[in-house]
Amino acid sequence: MLGAEAVEIWTDVPGMFSANPRQVPDARLLSRLDYAEAQEIATTGAKVLHPRCIHPLREVRVPLLIKDTNRPELPGTAIGWSTVQTAPSVKAISSRKGITLVSMESISMWQQVGFLADVFGAFKAHGLSVDLIGSSETNVTVSLDPSDNLLDSDVLARLCADLEAFCRVKVIAPCAAITMVGRGMRAMLHRLSAVLAEFGALDVHLISQSSNNLNLTFVVDEGLADALIPRLHALLIRAEAMRVDDAAVFGPSWRELAEGAAAAPRPAWWRHRREALLALAASGSPRYAYDLDEVRARARDLRALGAVDRWHYALKANPHPAILQVLHEEGFAFECVSIAEVEHVRRTLPALPPERILFTPNFAPREEYRAGLAAGVRMTLDALHPIVEWGADFADRDILLRVDLGSGRGHHDKVKTGGAQSKFGVALDEIETFREHARRHGARIVGLHAHLGSGILDTGHWRGVYAQIASLAERFNRIEMLDIGGGLGVPSRPDDAALDLAGLDATLAEVRSAYPQFKLWMEPGRYLVAEAGVLLGRVTQVKRKGEVHYVGIDAGMNSLIRPALYEAWHAIVNLTRLDEPPADLVQVVGPICETGDVLGHNRRLPPCREGDVILIAEAGAYGAVMGSRYNLREPAAEVIV
């Protein structure tokens, strides 16, 4: 009525965020939203706006600005009418607690005229507004939001009494509704595999996908919500379902706004070796380049942890002889998963005592176990079959037992190595059977081993593993050492915080003080070598298809399969134009005849030209060692710089 140019709401926060910032410090400021998205975010849990405040503005297209009273210089959140077509993206994840589910079941409801009218008539009679709805041939389940309903036990009792005239009723409470909001949710389902996997181990009571394609909601037990939201927010960013690189939509994180500019990370080694790397690529590409000083530095960082007695390098990450030599010099032992790896490390380091090699095969043939025993290396068994069927081979031998503690962790489902869906380890309920067969053959279980996943940045993970297997070890009489695996994460995205090694040392020391009788072993791989390696490729072609811009390079998934296999994120730069500002949002792809041959989705790079050198960082682990000759293309060669 006033003909307003805008409505400004001045409050005590800088705007709307991609999650509750008090719950998720890395939640990003939402710089720009359209009316529908803002409405959904407000309705599904954000407290900055009342859900009903947007409708009158939307009707006449008056923009809404949310600004911070204490920091008026911040841009805040702008909400308005948007006609710009943007790629689908999750904008926010939120939760509402205190949700009550009413589940109504009746075999006779299928194709029964008027059943739903009768049911919803009962809700109307008691003044209750239904929020989410899920239905099948014999069941209808609805949610009641306490913000819209006056719920108490008397109201619910009267409602259930009325509903029981039509169906069997079950009330499930308290619950929490966890909602992802973003335009084009259905177009992003393929990117949500890691997010959906988090719900796989939970009791999900209801799933609802909105008809306006703006949200996807999961209803779970209320007690799970607080821990789940930060994990899901991080997974959405990792899966590139929440495209925080889009500066037009996402601003700084709550942590950055609260603490000011973060300390600049240590410059990557390849920045000051740029000219040498450009010359290397000019002499032939694709190429892996490794800096041994980086390997040595990471090894010394780990060796400084006083709580760990022995470090084994997981050879499968990168078996380059020069890397093995450096780690041997730094006091590392070695963990191998095949007899070929055992033979490789013994050829490379002929003076290495066999007992400094830990052989941990998985579903290997009997001959490999026999060869390992003949070589005198330490042996880990991770299944009943070897001790049951080949028990005589382990007679009078010291062995380690790898146990599955029942769950896995990691940055992707395919790197989780615990739980029933993982092929590794002896299940807890089979340990006694394993011990009986070991005793029968005179095999001595002198160590327990547990490795549950990779890419973990939470120090509390290893505390939990350590405490669990230490408690388990007290049931044995000959345990000398506990191996709590590896999986130490490497920050790859700009928002990732580095693993807190001092915190890790402190938490391990705390557990060790309770179990001083056991030696502690760990077996990192990627942590030691990932940042020491880069993959260099040269631009072959550029292409536009509609709004999608492709930059093709001569390195493909046959050289670096992690992005295709694990949806792994690697930093990518145009090394030729390193100092030029980023401009285009591009897909970096290789020459392999597969749709999945994408090394980086939605990356901001300067305009690329044929012949430019593209550098892919954090590529020193699980890169060259997983290379193939698919399409009969040779994988990238390896060079020490």
Image: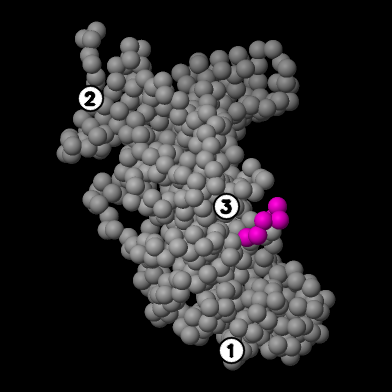
Residue on which the image places disc 1 = 352
Residue 206 rendering spot, x and y as whole percentages: 58, 35
Q: Is residue 91 left or right of residue 387?
A: left
* Distance of label 2 from label 3 (alpha carbons): 51 Å
Residue on which the image places disc 3 = 554
Q: Secondary structure at mark 2?
A: strand
Q: Nearer the viewer, mark 2 or mark 3?
A: 3
Residue 624 rendering spot, x and y as whole percentages: 59, 64
Residue on which the image places disc 2 = 8
Question: Are the residues at dot 2 and dot 3 in contact (C-beta closer than 8 Å)?
Answer: no
Q: Which residue is found at the position 35% from the left and 38% from the top?
A: 247
Kind of residue sitting beneath label 3: Asp
Q: Nearer the viewer, residue 594 or 312?
A: 594
Q: Which residue is found at the position 79% from the left and 84% from the top?
A: 393
Q: Residue furthest top?
A: 1
Task: Please tell me whether residue 89 belongs to the stretch shown in magenta.
Answer: no
Kind of residue sitting beneath label 1: Leu
State the extent of the magenta-drawn residues as a range.
630-635
